[in-house]
Amino acid sequence: MPPLGAWPSVLGMVTEDIRGEAVVRLDGVRKEYGGTTALDGVSLEIRAGEAVAVMGPSGCGKSTLLNMIAGLDRPTAGSVVVRGENVGELSEKGLALYRRRHIGMVFQFFNLIDDLSALDNVALAAQLTGTPAGQARRRALELFDELEIADRARAYPSVLSGGERQRVAVARALMNRPALLLADEPTGALDSRTGEQVMDLLLDLNQIGQTLVLVTHDERLARRCASRLVLLADGRVTGEHRLEPAA
Amino acid sequence: MRAVWRAARAAVRRRRLQTLVIGLVTLVSTGAVVIALGLVDAASAPFDRAFAEQRGPHVVASFASDAVSDAELTRAARQPGVESAAGPFRQATAELRAESADYGLGSTITVVGRPGPGGPVGRVDLWAGRWATRPGEVVVNRQSDWSADDLGRRLRLRSGPDLTIVGFAFDLSGTANAWVAPGQVTALRPTATQMLLRFEDASSADRLREGLAAVTDRLPENALTGSQSYLTLKDQIGSSARAYTPYLMAFGVLGIVVAVLIVANMVSGAVISGFRHIGVLKSLGFTPGQVLGVYLTMTGVPSLLGCALGTVLGNVVARPFFDAVFMGPASGVFHGEVGIAGWVNALALLGMPLVCVLAALAPGLRAHRLPAARAISAGGAPRAGRALGVQRRLAGARLPRSVSLGVGLPFARPGRSALTLAAVVLGVTTVTFATGLATTMTRFGDAGRDAYDVTVYATKYQDGKKILPRHDDRALHALLGSLPGASEVTARADAEARLAGTAQRVWLEGRRGDRPRLGDVLTDGRWAGRTGEVLATSAFLSRHDMKVGDRVRLEKDGRRQAFTVVGALMNNNAETVVTDWATLTRFAPREEPIAYHVKLGDGADPAAYARAARAADPGVDPVPVGPNNVTRTIVGSASVLTLMLAVVAALGVFNTAVLNTHDRRRDLGVLKSIGMTPRQVTAMTVTSMAVLGAAGSVAGVPLGMAGHHWVVPRMADAVDITLPPSMMDVWRAPALAGVALAGLAIAVLGALVPARRAARLTTAQVLRSE
């Protein structure tokens, strides 16, 4: 892992003056799909610099909760407010701009675009905001350096290992310096050794101030990376625990 | 079997849009194929069909009545090789008094004595009134798109009894101008006997000559006085239909190719995009054969339905369309006769589903061979690793990223893109070709149309009586020029003459007044400047194998005169030469104008002028210039066909965009998750098709121009017209830019709905389902 002190300049993490401020506030969020209730009155607050792990059995609403925060889906009732913006009230364009400005997402199955090289996958996130290609690629290369995959920048997703793909996905998520990094089962598709590396990466990111929300089945991951554990069952928050910092 | 059916039904339910698209595209494409094939069929053989319906004679033979008996002719017609015969019929030549033109007849007509319109050969179509059965009755040969309002009027012969018109019949073979009862014809002093012969082998002029030689072999040497082969007739009558043929063929072939391409693209795309589903079915225990069955059923049922409904649609649309296309005076012979042939319907009903099955079979067999796991992983997105270089270069391009991503998308599915591109190319070719054709036809139709606004005929018929003008020629000319609104008056006289030494009629047309050139378009040479000079129509020169500079000798009333052809006119009247007034009056001193062409001043109303002319002299018949039906028909039909093919091409793009967005649902979800706005998604999807549209324009515009340069001169040639360069030179930068936009328009219109649908995709659902 690189020395932590080098990261903030590249990654542009939250600064101390807003650390501790509430970044996400969910209030009575309910989500229904047809006759099925995925979330049932969830209220939750996440502060800047926090690392929150959401755990629970399959189908309990973990991913739905993450999608609500990411603005990928809208609540049926209640409100999701992120850095003062009520996500549920945003238009489709507003949601897209919201995701650009505030959200970085890491998926279980990486979700890289197969036709684009690793570098272009990462640069794409900045290019969509209008950043010129050269500038976007330069910043992407810096991220590749920091994540120790610079030698794989020109490779295509199909030739990358699982761990490399997930690092590329993390780089893409960090490209626009998001306020929130959301990770949905980020180690779920990786072997244990690669999973460990990704855990380290997330931990390091949080330690330099990146607010992190991760959804996982893996208690080890939660305990290692998160400072707070939120338990979900049947779409409701059934418990919250402070976690000891990782050794 | 039940499992296959249930799985196919479930798949159809799950892919309602795709099923709808398959049905819709096959419906429109099959409709287009039916109309296109119908056009090709109708344009290639209208004469043959009408001729077969009338059992027309392969040879119409005339025999000298005093040289051969009826019995001998009847025996001769039983020779081997003669399939059937009609006759002998007595045939007379009669001269009509002045009103002959009223009935569409010349001054000399052939009258045949015939007991009825039917018979084994030469069945004429009695379309109004009844057959002549009593003395003093006559049936006139007239096409059915004329009116029958002359029934009951009398034909007055110079030598012989007056005849009352009791019926109108149409005989494609032109065996007579009029028919009377066999008993009546003797009063007309017949000199010939007519036999109508059909031969077993009528495939060539040589075969017909041999057949006729066999018939006349045992007859007296000079018995046969004349004969006409149906091949000559076909050539003459078919010339007008031939004008349409290259144009209709071009549209027909384009229509068929576009429709087949799009159907093949759509069905194969549907199967490829279902690979993952195929893998799942296999993993559930479906045999490869059953899986193939599911996919063939899934695409086959909506295709079959689309084909069946498309065939019905094609037939419904074709009827009024063909009536319009075959309405011009040139093709009036076939008006109402042309429809969709049975074989066209059969081919569409069997052929289009076959195209669908074959298109589904190729990728289906690939899926059939694939192991389940690979089929699952091959489904959905295109194979990774395609066109990566293109994407890499585009990623660094100075374009908005949504646009550069869109530009690269067609390269990911090269086969599908190539088929779509081919459809767009053909769509643009059609638009370009049709635009050029319409411009040429409009220029052709408008040529000289501003030369005059009203034609005032110098005779008029009222209640069967001929009324002459009250004013003499010069006074009438002056009167017409003095009426309100008149600006120019040009008198026209037609002197009927014969080409010296032949029986071929020639009209020498002379003009006098303000605009002696009227609306004629000169294609070669110059205008007549000296007495004795004439201009010939291109058709006249072609028929008589002459050229500018040659001498033409005419005879009239026993006098002969030679004229020098100094120019060629764009005109398909093969009997006309044009000259100045002095040359005309020197050749035919007593000739009087038959009409005065009046050009009105700006803003003057032709109808008001016509009323004023009628009031000034009740003996004149003023007729304002009407619309040009031939041009209108061709331009109208070209517009309909172009629109139809453009819609089919746009549907092809629509289908490709639907398949691409379906294949790339996951990518779209990812892009939206990292902040791509709906507008950027729309821009990306539309750009991906606009690239094909632009490429289609680049290829299609030159192809369309080449088609125009190939087809239009052939259309003109078929009717013996030489088009001046000004009518062929229709392409200017604005026109080219306009047609180039056609490809983009087709692509953007086709892509817009799927693009907006892609923009509305719910990201969370897409990513979850992946």
Image: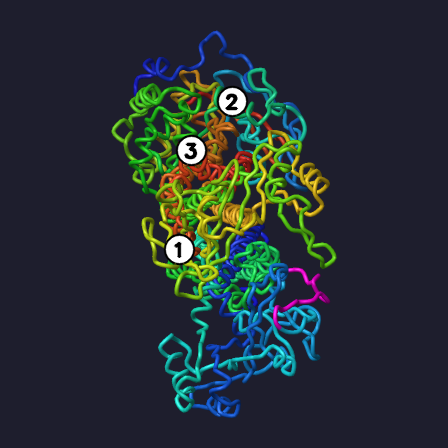
- Position of residue B715 relative to residue B515, above or below, is below
In the drawing, what numbered circle is on residue B561? Answer: 1
Distance in Å between CA atoms under marks 3 and 1: 54 Å
Q: Position of residue B474 (x, y in %)?
A: 59, 41
- The subunit letter for the residue under badge 2 reads A
Q: Nearer the viewer, residue B622 or B428?
A: B622
Whether residue B149 appears in magenta in the rendering, the answer is yes
Query: Which mark's residue is nearer the viewer, 1 or 2?
Result: 1
Residue on which the image places disc 2: A97
Q: Main secondary structure of the magenta part?
A: loop
Determine whether B31 is above or below B63 in the image. Answer: above
Horizontal relation, residue A93 to residue A163: left or right = right
Q: Amino acid at mark 2?
A: Leu
Q: Is residue A96 above or below residue B471?
A: above
- Asked whether the residues under marks 2 and 3 belong to the same chain, the reply is no
Residues tagged by mark 1 and mark 2 found on one chain of the structure: no
Subunit ID for the residue under disc 1? B
- Residue segment shown in magenta: B146-159
Residue located farthest toward the left when viewing the structure as drawn: A151
Q: Are marks 3 and 1 on the same chain?
A: yes
Q: Residue at x 38, y 25 (%)?
A: B399
Q: Quadrant of the C terminus of chain A?
A: top left
Is disc 2 placed on a helix, strand or loop?
A: helix
Look at 55% across and 38% down and name the residue there: B757
Query: Where is residue B218 shown, x and y percent of the image?
Result: 41, 91
